[in-house]
Image (cartoon, grey):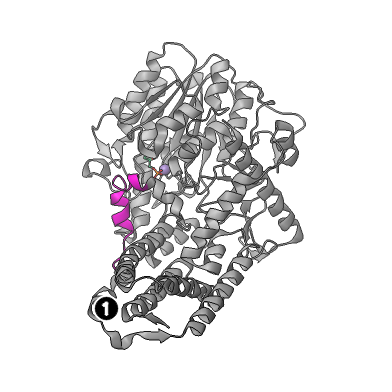
Amino acid sequence: MRRLSSLAILTLISFCLKSLYTRYEIIGSLEFGGAVVEVSFLFLLFLFLSLLKEKIAHFIYILLNITGSLLLIGAIMYFDYYNSIVTYKSLAQAGQIGDIRTSIFALFKLRYLLLFADLPFLFLYRKRKGLSFKIRRKTYLFLMAANILVIAWGFYKSTNIISEISQYETVGFFAYQFLEASAEKGLLGEDGEEVTPQLVNKIKPSSPKEDPQLNGIARNKNLIIIQLESVQSFLLNKQINNIEVTPNLNKLINEAFYFPHFYTQVGKGNTSDAEFLVNTSIYALGNEPMSTATAGKTLPSLPRHLRQAGYYSATFHANEISFWSRKEMYDALGFDEYFDQDYFGKEDFIAYGVSDEILYKKTIEKLAGFNGQKFYAHIIALSSHYPYDFPETKIAHTITLPDSFNGSIVGSYIKSVSYADFAFGLLLEELKAAGLYDDSVIVVYGDHQGVQTQNEKDTALVNDLVGHDYHSVLDHLNVPLIIKVPSATGGTIDTIGGLVDVYPTIANLLGLDIRDEIVFGTDLLNSKKNTVGIRFYAPTGTFVTKEYTFSPGKTRDSGKITLIENRNESPATPDSIKELNKILEFMKSSDAYIRSIE
Ligand code: GP9
Ligand code: MN
C-alpha cells in the first residue's frame, strides 16, 4: 500500500496546471497529446517521490514547487526574448543575470505571478491527512507502467521532429531537457566523415559564379568591421513622418554594396555569436554560446588569415571582457589585441558600457595610432541594446516619433536605432578626418533582431511599419549588411546571405586565398544561389532561399513555405524537403567541424 499525501496531490495538481499554463504562454495553445505526456511525466515523478519518507518527500515537494515555478517563469520570459525553449545549458550563463537585470525587469509581466498562486494553499493543506490517497501496490505499479508508456510514446514521436518548439510541445518542459541532453550525447558520440574543404564545398547549398568578380580589388586596404547592436533591416531607408530613421546608414548604402536579403544566424551567444560567425564562417551551435564552446581552441579565422597577410587585428567593445567569456573567444579567434571597459571606461554610460559616441571616438584614437600599419578593426557597438532606455541627454540625437509610438517598446527601439545611426554618422566623419575612410574596406552589419512585439499595440505598430504582417523570420531576422569598398561603386546585391557569409565575401575583396580553409559561407558578391540555415531564434530546420523561407513542421517531411515576394504561405514541396535535408546535413558538418578543432 502506498500513500500520496495531501501535499503531494496538491503539488502535483498545481504543478500540472503550471506546466500547462507555461505551455499556453509559450505555444499559444494546448495540444492534447503533448499535454498528456507532460502531465504523465510529472505524475511519474511524484509516484517516485512518494516512495521516500514522508518528511523528506514533503521537503522536496515544497522545494520543487518553488524552484519549478521559478524555472517555468524563466522559461516563459526566455521564450519572450529568444523565441526559443530554455534548456539546462543556460545555467552556465547564470553569472550574467546581474548584468542583464534591466532586460529581465522589462520582460516581466505581473500575470506570471499566477505561477505562485498556489503557495498559500499548499501551506494550509500540507498536513490534512483527509485528502490523502491510498494506492494499492498493484494500482501503483499499473500507474507507473501507464505513465511510462505515455512518456515513451511522446519520446518516440519526438524522434521524427527537428523543431525544438515542436519537441517541447510533444513531451513538455521537463522531459524536453532529457531530449536535449540525449541529442547532445548523440552528437558528441557521432563518427561522421572527416570534414574537409572538399567535402564542405561538395555539400554547400550555394554555387559560385564561373567568373568571380572584384577579386583582390581591396588588397592591402585596412579592414574596419562595425557590428551594430540589434539593428534590423526594416528601419533602413525608412521614413516616419518624413524623417529618416537611419540617415547615415542610408547615405553609406548609396556608395557601397548593400545586401537587403541578409539574415542573422546567431544562437544563444547573441552579440558574441555574431562576432564568432563573422570571423570564422562556421555556424553557431545554437543552444550554447560559441565563446564557451570554442574556449581553448585555436580556430582558423579572419584575424589569423589577415595576420599572414601582414595585418594587425584588434577588437573593440565597451562592456567588460568577461561578459560572454569574450577573453576566451578572442584568444580562440586569434585577435592580436582587444579593448574592453578597462580601456573605454564608464563615461557617458548606456546599457553595458560607454555610449557608441565614446566607443567610436576612443577606437579611432587607437586606429590612428597604428601609424600606417595595415589593420583589421572589429568594432562592436552597444548603445542600441534592449530594453532601449536612453538617458535624457541623448534624446536630442534620436528621431522624433508620432504620438502613436508613445509608451511602446517599438518606439523605444526605433529611437535607440536612430541614436546608433547618429553615433555611426560621427564615426564616418572621424574616419574621414583621420584619413582612414578612403583607405579601408568598411563593413557594417546588424548582429541580430531587436524588436519585441509582445502586445497588440507593438504588433500593430510594427505591422504598419513593414506594410504587412511582421514575419518571425523574413522581417524579424533580416539584418543589414553593407560593404563599402574603396574604388568600387557598389550597388544593391539581391543574393540571399547570412552572417556565415561575411568572411568569404571579404576574403575575395581583400584577395585572401581561402580555398584550403574550411568555410561554411559563400562569397555573396560571386554566388548564383545560396541557402541560409537558421536555428535558435527560429526552430532548427528553418532556412531561407532566394524565393522562400521554410518553417519545419511536426515531422521531418512536413513544413510550411512562405514566399518572400508576396508572403503567400503553402505546405512544403518535395523540393523544399530536399533543401531541408541538405541544409540540415550541412549544419551538422559545421557542428562536427567545430567540435573537432582543438
Ligand atoms: C554585452 C553585449 C550584450 O557585452 O554583448 O548584448 P547581447 O548579447 O545581449 O545582444
Ligand atoms: Mn547584441
Q: Amino acid at mark 1?
A: Arg
**Percent of width and height locating residue 59:** 29, 68
SS state under label 1: loop
Quarter residue 112 falls in: bottom left
Left or right of residue 400: residue 505: right
Query: Splitting the image into four quadrants, where does ligand 2 fall?
Result: top left
Instruction: Using a 10 Å C-alpha cutoff, classify the residue at mark 1 as few (fewer than 14 neighbours), some (14 to 19) or many (20 or more).
Output: some
Quadrant position of the C terminus in the picture: top right
Residue 465 higher or lower than 155, as above or below: above
Q: Quadrant of residue 518?
A: top right
Q: Is residue 251 left or right of residue 401?
A: right
Q: Residue at x 41, y 14 (%)?
A: 370
Q: Residue at x 23, y 32 (%)?
A: 347
Q: Taking 27 as reference, is 490 above or below it?
A: above
Q: Position of residue 188 (x, y in %)?
A: 60, 45
Residue 140 shows up from this direction: yes
Tell me if I can see residue 399 in this picture. Answer: no
Residue stretch rendered in magenta on the structure: 94-111
User: For residue 105: magenta?
Assistant: yes
Main SS class of the magenta portion in the image: helix
Along the viewing direction, whichever of 579 and 363 lies nearer the viewer: 579
- What count of labels does the image hold? 1
Q: Is residue 453 magenta?
A: no
Viewer-closest of 440 and 165: 165
Q: Position of residue 99 (x, y in %)?
A: 30, 44
Q: Quadrant of the N terminus?
A: bottom left
Report which residue position mark 1 lands on.
126
Question: Camera-side residue: 473 or 329?
Answer: 329
- Answer yes or no: disc 1 within 8 Å of ligand 1: no
Image coordinates for residue 6, horizontal then vertical, percent: 32, 81
